[in-house]
Image: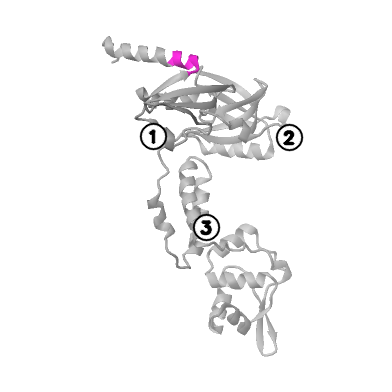
Amino acid sequence: MPTRPPSADATAAAQDRLSPNARRLLRKLSDGHRLTTAEAADHLDVSARTIRNLRAELEDAGIPVQRARDGHATQLYLRPEDQGHYVEPLHLTEQQMQALTVAINAAAHVLAPTPYHAPLQAAFRAVRREWLARAFTFEPETEAAHWHFGGLPQQDIPEETFAVLAKAIRNRQTLVLDYYTASRDAWTRDRRLDPYVIARRQGSWMLAAYCHEKQAVRDFSLAGMQHLRPYEPNGTPVYFGATPDFDPHEHFRGRGGALAGDAWVDVRLLVEPNAAPYFKRKRYHASQRIEEEQADGRLVVHYRVRGLRGFVSGIRSWGRLVTVLEPQSLREELTAEFYELAGRYVNGEDLS
């Protein structure tokens, strides 16, 4: 009775346990080659005894290696139905592996609250085992000590939230959920959304989605979501189809914060000489442009941002080293905030 080809998951797991030479032999056989022990030994540059050990290693991993007599020699092969079911191992240069190691370390911080963190680490361990069979000038195990990607706030978001959203986005399925709006300190029950894309902005996880209540695309904080489930009136799932008019890059372009508004705003800052070198060296927003460098060393810096919610916190962090020139509404907001805060200290307000 024919043996059913192993599943992709099973073959990937089996290969993960194989030695590099066993994988090389498997790859040759999976390509349809029939090799005698002598031919296989010559191809791998090993002894005939090693080939017999490698054949046993493949068989122990559940890979159905066949044997047939060819005169006085024994041929190794895979039946046609067993060929092509094996994952090709990666062949990475040292520079590629080092870049992958750094990227995994960076992604580990970003994806920590998501269901993708553990599988990512497991995948990298599998790649690393293949890599450790070679000798190069750096060790993936210790590379993490040379990089640090922390510093951004983390949100405590249930893994189930990511799982439900990712599945709905892939299937273009409408969802219904309860949503908490922090600015109004209020819940909206049974809010219906067509989810488009998950994004991480300034440490906050968010969802861009079409809101059936507002009849427009809006941004929603994942931290404010509860009771996510497919929208199934009368027990029938609702699908929203393609979204040709939505471009995630355009949607997030110029955003100054996680839940920024839709209106574009021109911001001009007067930067004191002590802070000027930082603005010359670093771009704090993609639209940053130095309009003027004054004789006393001060700078006039221009930004064009979409909403001010997150952008303003960066301005506040500079304190007296940065003055808002425009918009006037922002000047008035910061002025009122300054007098309120100063009053608490000058008047000795009891905050206990």
Determine whether 146 is above or below 255 in the image: below
Q: Which residue is mark 3?
A: 96
For the question of whether residue 190 can be seen, the reply is yes
Q: Residues within 10 Å of mark 3 (few under 14, many from 20)?
A: few
How many circles with numbers are drawn on the protein?
3
Q: CA distance from mark 2 to mark 3?
A: 38 Å
Question: Closer to the camera: disc 1 or disc 2?
Answer: 1
Q: Which residue is mark 1?
A: 277
Q: Nearer the viewer, residue 98 or 182?
A: 98
Q: What element does badge 1 sit on?
A: helix
In the image, taking residue 28 as reference, residue 180 lies left or right, namely: left
Three-letter code, disc 3: Gln
Q: Quadrant of residue 164?
A: top right
Q: What element does badge 3 sit on?
A: helix
Q: Which residue is mark 2?
A: 241
Q: Residues within 10 Å of mark 1 (few under 14, many from 20)?
A: some
Question: Closer to the camera: disc 2 or disc 3?
Answer: 3
Q: Position of residue 319 (x, y in %)?
A: 36, 24
Q: CA distance from mark 3 to mark 1?
A: 34 Å
Q: Which residues are magenta?
A: 326-333
